[in-house]
Image (cartoon, rainbow, N blue to C red):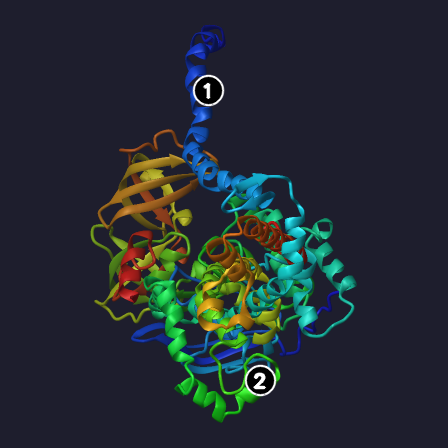
Amino acid sequence: MITVTNKTDHGGDVRLTGISKTYGSFTAVHPLDLTVPQGSFFALLGASGCGKTTTLRMIAGLEEPSSGTVFLGDQEVTHLPPYKRPVNTVFQSYALFPHLDIFENVAFGLRRRGIKSVKKQVEDMLDLVQLGEQARKKPHQLSGGQQQRVAVARALINHPKVLLLDEPLGALDLKLRRQMQLELKRIQTEVGITFVHVTHDQEEAMTMADTVAVMNAGRVEQLGSPTDLYENPQTTFVANFLGTSNLIEAEVDSKTNGDIVLKAGGAGKLVLPEARCSAPTTTGGRVLVGVRPEKISLTHADEAGEIPEGRNRITGRIADSSFIGVSTQYVIDSPVCPEFEVYAQNIDRDARLVPGAEVVLHWNPAHTFGLDAAQSLLAGTVDSAGIDEQAAV
Amino acid sequence: MATLTEAPPPLTPTAPEETPPRKRGRLVPYWLLLPGILWLLIFFALPMIYQASTSVQTGSLEEGYKVTWHLSTYWDALSEYYPQFLRSVLYAGSATVLCLILGYPLAYLIAFRAGRWRNLIMILVIAPFFTSFLIRTLAWKTILADGGPVVGALNTLHVLDVTSWLGMTSGDRVLATPLAVVCGLTYNFLPFMVLPLYTSLERIDVRLHEAAGDLYAKPVTTFRRVTFPLSMPGVVSGTLLTFIPAAGDYVNADLLGSTDTRMVGNVIQTQFLRILDYPTAAALSFILMAAILIMVTLYIRKSGTEDLV
């Protein structure tokens, strides 16, 4: 059925060099270099209007780049029309042909390439996506999840070098989306084709992709593995867009063997490993110190003495707490940061940790990251989304 | 537990109150239909019955007509005027094909390529309706006039030689030939083709074009396999809206044709208004109606879009 492509060849590499797209005076994608290695699951992640779909469409040939080149393996395809490119797309709304049944939808690409006996291949492909029974139904007779699988089957049957997925799960409900994420990941592992996946859902990108490129306003902010992006964000946009980050503005006090010591408002000293700071640090300069909410421990102020030495600590008062089952999410009012978020696992809950309680927040300095203080603290947060889009237009 | 015992279902007190408005509510659609039904009864069904009875009457204008169930009027009308029937089908059919050939690219252009010019082009398509049908047809008399620029150009290009050979024109003339009638019909019914075509093309998601291209279909194949099949409802309703009125039309044949181009509409008109042979005219009308119904049914069956029209 499906040939598993040799992972060592480079036929399925996608190489974009200096690729950009402008519409009149609006730049949708700034010149961009990107290499997606053969056989990887690559995600382009960003808010709507960040240029991720435009980038995908330039790979598919549905959009002509304003500059730059697109290579698939060793073949330049920049100016090839879509029907001559060895890529297939799973469209956002599936774009199934409403006048053809499921079988003919899936067979469409094979027939266009003049393949005569399509029956076996189509049936195998429909079995792969568990739709063998539905072959003679029309698309509108299927549920959203089934239509989605037809769209995947219709693209995959052509053994493309690269499969492009444009928000393929956007129209599905949450539960089905989770299920399809795993399903797509399974298919990708099985067929070994390069997948380029566009999504605005950070959880989806992190669950499925080997490599994620976070895009913002037509530029790639950061590229890396999900863990790398989450643990070592390089910009405030990435820090806020991927999960939640607490960011504190601090001043460089001194540097000692690989650690930077910082002063932050009334919080005393904070320690940040130099390797985890993406900003230039000079004594007296300003740096944004970040820490993820789940890395922080909460201790009631009465027991502050029991906190081990060598941990970063900040004092504050619980402003709000919400119990969400696996964890409790606290919002802490602190002099250095007005809304400090802390997620605590519900293992041994301290009954005194209720809104109004004075607490000490402490965490391992190794979990601290440093960012350039010249950026907006709010980039990539929900509040700033509207402003970003206005600025982009 | 407590709520279970305390809350008996309050169905009994409210049920009688709820029923009457429901009943009245159920009748509302019929009340709303009433004006339309009355209109159809008075202005469609009654005249049809009247015409049906006329078609089986015998008599004369002086002595008055009586219903005598003289069904042979139908046979007589058909055997005498079948050339006009055939001509009607031929002219209306040719005009419909021409309308489709001219109208499809235009509708396609408006639906997919016109961008911000879309509304303007739509207005231009509909604009002729602002002048009278008669005036527009008369204008074609001038356009196709003997010695006019159109005829001159066609003559120079030897097009008229070809059309004469095909029997569509005679000599150096276009006016008073079948070609002129078909041109008039095509012109007058073109908007009835373009509008339904546009409506069904405009509904096609452009992403389907992208998907077809993405699946290795060349633009021509995309048109043949995706766009055209999806526009079939528009093609069917456009051809019906063109063919049916064109088959019964008499103005174009009257103004642009000659005695050799008379269509069945002209015969009916003459029978009714000049010869005053009402039974024959009524019988001809019914034959035309039946013929069109049969052709349309066969056509819809053939194009397999019963559920879409």
Number of residues whose C-alpha sits closer than 10 Å to that of mark 1, classed few (under 14), some (14–19) or many (20 or more): few
Identity of the amino acid at label 1?
Lys
Identity of the amino acid at label 2?
Ser
Which of the 4 quarters of the picture holds residue B239? bottom right
Whether marks 2 and 1 lie on the same chain: yes
Residue on which disc 1 sits? B23
Q: Chain of mark 1?
A: B
Q: Chain of mark 2?
A: B
- Tag 1 or tag 2, which sits nearer the N-term? 1
- What label sits on residue A36 in the rendered view? none
Answer whether residue A273 is visible to the viewer in this image.
no
Q: Residue at x 58, y 70 (%)?
A: B222
Find residue B72 and report its horizontal and vertical position in percent: 67, 48
Side of B305 relative to A127 (left or right)? left
Report the label total.
2
Find residue A282 and report its horizontal and vertical position in percent: 26, 71
Determine the residue located farthest toward the front in the rendered image: B62
In terms of secondary structure, where does tag 2 sit? helix
Q: Nearer the viewer, residue B269 or B151?
A: B269
- What label sits on residue B164 in the rendered view? 2
Answer whether residue A17 is visible to the viewer in this image.
yes
Determine the residue located farthest toward the bottom in the rendered image: B156
**Which marked residue is nearer to the observer: mark 2 or mark 1?**
2
In terms of secondary structure, where does tag 1 sit? helix
Find residue A243 and report its horizontal and vertical position in percent: 41, 53
Q: CA distance from mark 2 to mark 1?
A: 70 Å
Q: Nearer the viewer, residue A274 or A141?
A: A141
Q: Is A50 situated above or below B180?
A: above
